């Protein structure tokens, strides 16, 4: 057997094991709670594109305005600081951080989830012999951090949907209890 055949066989066994045990990638289907969503971002917030993609993957129709639910991105902040230095005083590692402030509202403007801050950070090693590669790696890390924050916001929206669904179920149950019972023989 060649090395390529061995790799293919191992990958097949791993894949069969994962499928056989019922493993699935986590996916949030929000379409049962909300039909559409809008993303409103203040100037300077660039995370909205990643969030729109994540909402689309979760089954929501993303519309410019008037969605059943509105995610408001009010602030985004990027940080870059030295995490470790070489003996020569150059940065050997940098910590990259991305922070976003967001809230969730319904179409009428009623707050479904209060404003909160999400933050993600990564440490990157700097290769002084390959500065171009290091800057490309930094761009990849920034993209991954944006995707992670977008996924976290979708998870937050899933929790809002769960709470919203529980409230709607409770309201329907209360409405059913408050209706008068018919008296007399049943047909």
Image (cartoon, grey):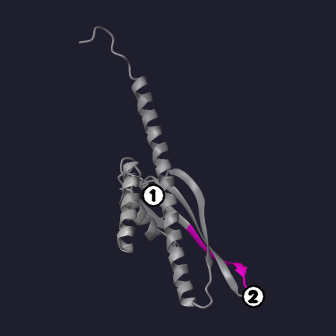
6 magenta-colored: no
Compare marks 2 and 1 and give the one earlier in the sequence: 1
- Above or below — where is 139 with respect to 54? below
Quarter of the image with the N terminus in it: bottom left
Q: Quadrant of residue 168?
A: top left
Instruction: Estimate the x, y position of residue 25 in percent, counting from the top left.
Output: 42, 56
Kindly report the secondary structure that dominates the magenta region of the rendered protein. strand
Between 60 and 149, the residue placed more toward the observer is: 149
Would you identify the image quadrant in which residue 82 lies?
Answer: bottom right
User: Can you identify the residue that label 2 sits on?
Assistant: 89
How many other residues sit within 10 Å of disc 2, few (<14), some (14-19) or many (≥20)? few
Q: Give the residues drawn in magenta, as a range.
A: 75-87
Residue found 68% across the figure and 78% down from its top: 81
Judge whether residue 84 is colored magenta. Answer: yes
What residue lies at 40% left-to-right and 63% top-to-bottom?
10
Which corner quadrant of the image does residue 63 belong to?
bottom left
Q: Nearer the viewer, residue 155 or 179?
A: 155
Q: Residue at x 44, y 34 (%)?
A: 171
Disc 1: which residue: 70
Spatial separation of the CA atoms under disc 2 and disc 1: 47 Å
User: Label 1 crowding class (10 Å Cα cut-off): few <14, some 14-19, many 20+?
Assistant: many
Q: Residue at x 57, y 70 (%)?
A: 76
Q: Is residue 183 visible?
A: yes
Vertical comparison of 18 with 165: above or below: below
Q: Is residue 123 left or right of residue 178?
A: right
């Amino acid at each position: 057997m060649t090395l390529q055949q061995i790799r293919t066989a191992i990958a097949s066994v791993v894949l069969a094991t994962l499928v056989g045990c019922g493993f699935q990638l986590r996916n949030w289907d929000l379409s049962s709670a909300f039909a559409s969503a809008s993303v409103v971002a203040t100037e300077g917030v660039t995370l909205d594109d990643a969030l729109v993609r994540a909402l689309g993957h979760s089954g929501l129709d993303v519309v410019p305005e008037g969605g059943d639910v509105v995610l408001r991105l009010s602030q985004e902040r990027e940080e870059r600081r030295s995490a470790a230095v070489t003996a020569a005083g150059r940065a050997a590692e940098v910590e990259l951080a991305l922070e976003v402030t967001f809230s969730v509202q319904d179409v009428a403007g009623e707050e479904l989830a209060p404003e909160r801050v999400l933050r993600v950070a990564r440490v990157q090693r700097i290769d002084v012999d390959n500065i171009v590669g290091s800057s490309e790696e930094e761009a990849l890390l920034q993209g991954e951090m944006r995707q992670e924050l977008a996924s976290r916001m979708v998870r937050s929206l899933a929790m809002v949907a769960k709470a919203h669904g529980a409230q709607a179920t409770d309201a329907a149950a209360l409405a059913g209890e408050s209706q008068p019972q018919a008296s007399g023989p049943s047909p």
